[in-house]
Image (spheres, rainbow, N blue to C red):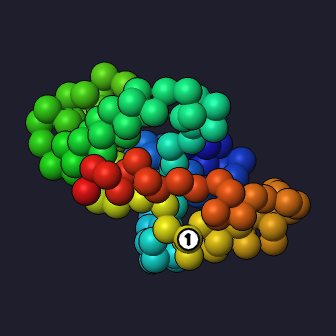
Amino acid sequence: MPAALSEGRISGYCVAEPFGAQSVAAGKGKTLFESHELWEGSLCCGLVLRNDFIKNNPAVVEEFVIEYVNAGLKAESKNKDVKNITAKYLKAEPEVLDLSLEWISYENLRLEEAEYNELVKYMAEMGLSRNPPEYSQFVDNSFIDKVK
């Protein structure tokens, strides 16, 4: 997407980081809106595990979710260690990572019902999902709630 934008093949895009920051840092694009300006409490990503895995490995899942939450708390500090770890996995230039980390929030990793339902509504409107599961059928915050 950054290449397509800089070449004029597309006029804009909405994407996960660091791809938005790549175009801005390169001087080939500008931010029109951050996701929270368009949708307060917008969802960026989620942790999805299979029911059978959860049922058969509750201790593993609990430990995994604890570490997931701890990683989010650490990432929210956006300190030098976080930037080094992020650079290792995202393989982006430092100025791109700095900009991305400015925009990304790890404060709330819990999926709320209102946010989920809004996402489901948007997905249906765009024809991306015809029969999404109900919140109660798909979301289980019990493990994340144990951490807080």
| Residue 131 or residue 87, whichever sits in front | 131
Q: Residue at x 75, y 58 (%)?
A: 133
Any part of residue 139 in sight: yes
User: Can you give x and y, in whole percent of width and height, for residue 126 in the image?
Assistant: 81, 66
User: Can you give x and y, in whole percent of width and height, for residue 18 in the image?
Assistant: 43, 43
User: Can you give x and y, in whole percent of width and height, for residue 141 in the image?
Assistant: 46, 56
Q: Residues within 10 Å of mark 1 (few under 14, many from 20)?
A: few
Q: Residue at x 20, y 36 (%)?
A: 82
Q: Residue at x 50, y 43 (%)?
A: 47
User: Can you give x and y, in whole percent of width and height, for residue 8 in the image?
Assistant: 66, 50
| Residue 16 or residue 5, whichever sits in front | 16
Considering the image in quadrants, where does the C terminus appear?
A: bottom left
Compared to residue 28, the image places residue 79 above or below, namely above
Indicate the quadrant where residue 103 lies: bottom left
Considering the image in quadrants, where does the N terminus appear?
A: top right
Any part of residue 26 in sight: no
User: Looking at numbered disc 1 in the image, what kind of residue is underneath it?
Assistant: Glu
| 106 relative to 1 in the view: left or right | left
Q: Residue at x 49, y 61 (%)?
A: 111
| 89 relative to 1 in the view: left or right | left
| Residue 97 or residue 22, whichever sits in front | 97
| Residue 47 or residue 43, whichever sits in front | 47
Check disc 1 and report the residue beneath it: 113
| 120 relative to 35 in the view: left or right | right
Label 1: state its secondary structure. Answer: helix
